[in-house]
Image: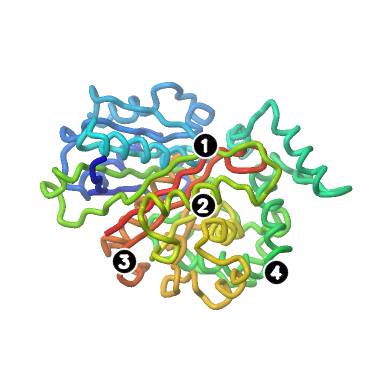
């Protein structure tokens, strides 16, 4: 396998853009990535396009990548459409990396895009609700509830109508971490405050305002322990990355970011919350990258809710579970802390246009490793990690993509 570098990244601002279509979003992100990498459109040999819900939200099915790229003059090359819920574009990154590492292509484009906002909020919720096994999910949740005890329910009143079903899933999972490690709603609110502070420094973030602990706790209940400011918003956006073989990197940049490891896995039907796809893949990604959790200098994890940030840091082996409360209270996860986490503001603040999320994580860590992150720049990072999950199978993520990148 050949060494592969990210030579450029680009993204749009995340937010609610009713006047922009998927072609507009892809054009903006890809042109940004081309400019950052120094290559021309003609240099791109293949494209890997991640999207989850364009069919349900816009009606565009089947050839989403070809439609968006041809509109900006990128055509004839192989275009691969990758759909894997919230992990769509990080899965596309994995396939793009493999094509270059294996020698099939020398220079490829990876992009993720999504139009998720609609004036009819139910349309967005219905789209998100398809990221489950529609035939079996209720049976799976019923079996899981039977293990919880009498009267315990995963889905609470208003699920799928007032909020995404994923919020109920996260609330269910995080309660186990509260019981096991003594984590509290205040801890989660502290994480949200941190995320909003980071987001205030990110010009691409959907929310760019610092908030107080009291504001987070008083922002309105979604489902305990989640409040509104602890949950990722619905929005639109796109992000892109250019991958290049080592033999051609010097033509384009003096600041390559190397892909140390890229790994995709799937969940399984299990009712053991400790047997998660994140836990199963974490050891494999570190072994493949030749590093350990202690070597990571910053990480972007899939915080569709603020509690899931610390949950996934524990599952990745980055934060010891018994020290999770201390890490939050003492600022270990802050920009100047021991383990800067979600420096972009995370999904909670940066936003979560699901098909674009994975590439947006890549964008953030590449900018950090190239020391181009501006006011949110962490000190001298050398190794970074991204964690991006999507969908539900059983009571676990259906898809998971992990990447380790090095300066």
Q: Residue at x 31, y 49 (%)?
A: 259
Image location of residue 47, percent across then percent down: 29, 32
Q: Is residue 107 left or right of residue 272?
A: left
First in sequence, mark 3 or 2: give its number.
2
Q: Which mark is residue 278?
A: none
Residue tagged 3: 374
Q: CA distance from mark 3 to mark 2?
A: 22 Å
Q: Which mark is residue 85?
A: 1
First in sequence, mark 4 or 1: give its number.
1
Residue tagged 2: 302
In front here: 323 or 231?
323
Question: Relative to residue 270, is residue 197 depicted above or below?
Answer: below
Q: Quadrant of residue 254?
A: bottom left
Closer to us: mark 2 or mark 4? 4
Question: Relative to residue 316, is residue 49 depicted above or below?
Answer: above
- Asked if marks 2 and 4 touch (Cβ < 8 Å), the reply is no
Residue tagged 4: 182
| Disc 4 residue crowd, few under 14, some 14–19, many 20+, Cα 10 Å | some
Considering the image in quadrants, where does the C terminus appear?
Answer: bottom left
């Amino acid at each position: 396998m050949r060494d592969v570098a990210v030579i450029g990244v680009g993204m749009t601002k995340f937010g609610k853009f009713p006047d922009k279509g998927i072609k507009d979003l892809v054009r903006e992100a890809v042109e940004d990535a081309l400019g950052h990498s120094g290559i021309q459109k003609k240099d791109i040999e293949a494209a890997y396009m991640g999207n989850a819900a364009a069919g349900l939200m816009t009606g565009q099915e089947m050839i989403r990548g070809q439609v968006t790229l041809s509109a900006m003059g990128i055509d004839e090359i192989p275009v691969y459409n990758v759909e894997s819920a919230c992990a769509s574009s990080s899965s596309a990154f994995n396939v793009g990396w493999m094509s270059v590492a294996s020698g099939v292509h020398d220079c490829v484009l990876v992009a993720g895009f999504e139009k998720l906002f609609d004036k009819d909020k139910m349309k967005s919720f219905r789209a998100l609700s398809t990221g489950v096994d529609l035939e079996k999910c209720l049976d799976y949740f019923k079996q899981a509830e039977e293990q919880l005890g009498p009267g315990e329910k995963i889905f609470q009143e208003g699920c799928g109508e007032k909020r995404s079903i994923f919020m109920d899933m996260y609330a269910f999972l995080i309660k186990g971490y509260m019981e096991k490690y003594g984590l509290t709603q205040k801890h989660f609110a502290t994480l949200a405050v941190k995320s909003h502070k980071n987001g205030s420094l990110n010009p691409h973030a959907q929310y760019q305002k610092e908030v107080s602990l009291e504001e987070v706790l008083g922002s309105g209940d979604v489902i305990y322990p989640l409040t509104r400011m602890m949950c990722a918003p619905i929005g639109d956006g796109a992000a892109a990355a250019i991958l290049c073989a080592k033999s051609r990197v010097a033509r384009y940049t003096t600041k390559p970011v190397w892909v140390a490891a890229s790994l995709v896995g799937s969940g399984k039907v299990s009712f053991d919350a400790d047997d998660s796809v994140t836990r199963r893949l974490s050891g494999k990604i570190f072994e493949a990258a030749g590093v350990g959790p202690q070597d990571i200098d910053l990480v972007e994890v899939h915080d569709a809710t603020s509690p899931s940030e610390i949950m996934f840091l524990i599952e990745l082996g980055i934060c010891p579970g018994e020290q999770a409360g201390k890490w939050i209270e003492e600022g270990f996860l802050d920009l100047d802390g021991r383990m800067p986490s979600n420096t972009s503001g995370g999904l909670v603040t940066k936003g979560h246009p699901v098909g674009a999320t994975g590439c947006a994580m890549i964008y953030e860590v590449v900018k950090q490793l190239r020391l181009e992150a501006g006011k949110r720049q962490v000190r001298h990072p050398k190794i970074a990690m991204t964690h991006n999950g999507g969908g539900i199978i059983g009571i676990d993520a259906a898809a998971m993509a992990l990447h380790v990148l090095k300066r």
